[in-house]
Amino acid sequence: MDLKLKIWRQKNSSDQGQIVDYDIKGVSPDMSFLEMLDVLNTELIEKGDDPVAFDHDCREGICGMCSLQINGKPHGPDAAITTCQLHMRKFNDGDTIYIEPFRSRAFPVVKDLVVDRSAFDRIQHAGGYISVNTSGNTQDANAIPVNKDNADHAFDAATCIGCGACVAACKNASAMLFVSAKVSQYALLPQGQVERKKRAEQMVAQMDAEGFGACTNTGACSAECPKEISLTNIARLNREFLNSKFN
Amino acid sequence: MSWFSSTFSSSIGRKFAMALSALFLVFFLLMHLTTNMLSVFSANAFNEASHFMGTNPVVQFLLQPVLIAAVVFHFVMGFILEAKNKAARPVKYAKKDTGNATWISQNMIYSGLVILAFLVLHFIDFWVPEMNYKYIEQLPAVTDRYYGELVHKFQNPVRVVAYVIAFVLLSLHLLHGFQSSLQSSGINNKFTPGIKKFTEIYAIAIPLGFVLIAIYHFINH
């Protein structure tokens, strides 16, 4: 199939950037979206042009590296997948496809479609961990009884791959779904109890310091999340934060 | 940073404060509707209730300032949050698909602005003349004047239309805002589907009640 691509091109973080049109012909419906971009880049390199920079790594939907706002939706039109799992059969011959970087003040554009998502790393560093003494006496986690519901919910929260689609989808560029998943996975497990209050306080403080917006409960984040992280996690984060402040 | 500023300068703390003021205003709407409802059934009962509300010192000097503070806070905090949220995405998307998010959940600021415009009109219509009557000109208490004043206001079709438009927007605002305020307070559990249904019924029934009362007086007088 033949497609018209409207791709955000930006030389570096200080460049203004603009949408540039590209025509691509003979795209196979069996290609993944990233393979289609690979083909485009090969053509650009052959012509001596600068290839389009975009993030990717595992191409199996688990690393959280790929991104892209495709026709206004993070990871494109399909539900519960990442861009690397999106196939060109989801598009029609002759379609125009807008490809933009995830937009947020906290995710500055590095080049073209690549954004710096290290704000998520800094939020994690602020409290998204448990302190375990690994001197050789560490207790086997499987030996600690955990309520099945809590274990399931913690696991669901832990499936977050930190791709940033929630931020990209939210009209406020809020990171609440990401932070709520990271807080929830520990809040629900025995190992997370010791640092529970500090974790919620510090991760929320870092989230605000990075410049993400506030949650207005539109639900756009959860709908676009490739791992379908639930909004109940955001309510839990609200509880965890308020508990840390009022209890 | 002090406990107060670290709590209420945080995005979650601000949303919680916003939610508390919202829940207070949601409850106030029910009180207001109950009083207005009396005007349909009995002019005397409406006059008595209005006189009580207008002269009782607890209502006048405690509840009224709290209500005004809640209204002002809700609007000011709404604008602050909106400005911060807008600033979180300085470069807009060339193409945006809002997906499953409802129009109203994405545009609470606009329904809020219409409600604010209505509140200004409402204050000019009722509150300012009332304050003038009681505290500036200090006119003698006339206990049966309220019903006549209410009916007189609803003779003007332009006012009734403005009233209906404002309450449609209020209904939309509540459809998202009521359940959103519970989520912002951390309430999301196995009862949430039922609670959400209740908030939706409330969000439609309360504004509809105000509208029907206005239309009733417009038609019957």
Image: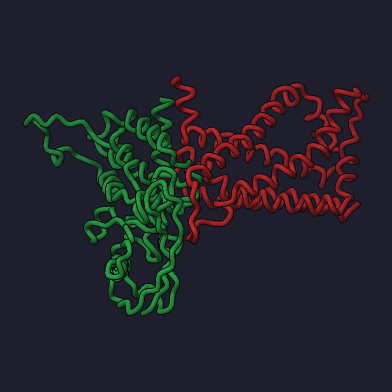
Chain colours: A green, B red
Query: Residue A77, image x and y in percent?
Result: 40, 66
Query: Residue B149, image x and y in percent?
Result: 89, 40
**Quadrant housing the N terminus of chain A:** bottom left
Left or right placement of residue B208 versus residue A206 in this view: right
**On screen, A18 above or below B145?**
below
Query: Residue B21, image x and y in percent?
Result: 59, 34
Q: Nearer the viewer, residue A108 or A81?
A: A108
Q: Residue at x 57, y 36 (%)?
A: B80
Query: Residue A124, image x and y in percent?
Result: 30, 38
Q: Nearer the viewer, residue B28 or A178?
A: A178
**On screen, B58 above or below A173?**
above
Q: Residue furthest front?
A: A48
Q: Quadrant of residue A144?
A: top left
Q: Nearer the viewer, residue A89 or A236?
A: A89
Q: Residue at x 36, y 45 (%)?
A: A178
Left or right placement of residue B183 versus residue A58 in this view: right
Left or right placement of residue B90 versus residue A200 in this view: right
Would you say residue A81 is visible in this rendering?
no
Q: Nearer the viewer, residue B147 or B117?
A: B117
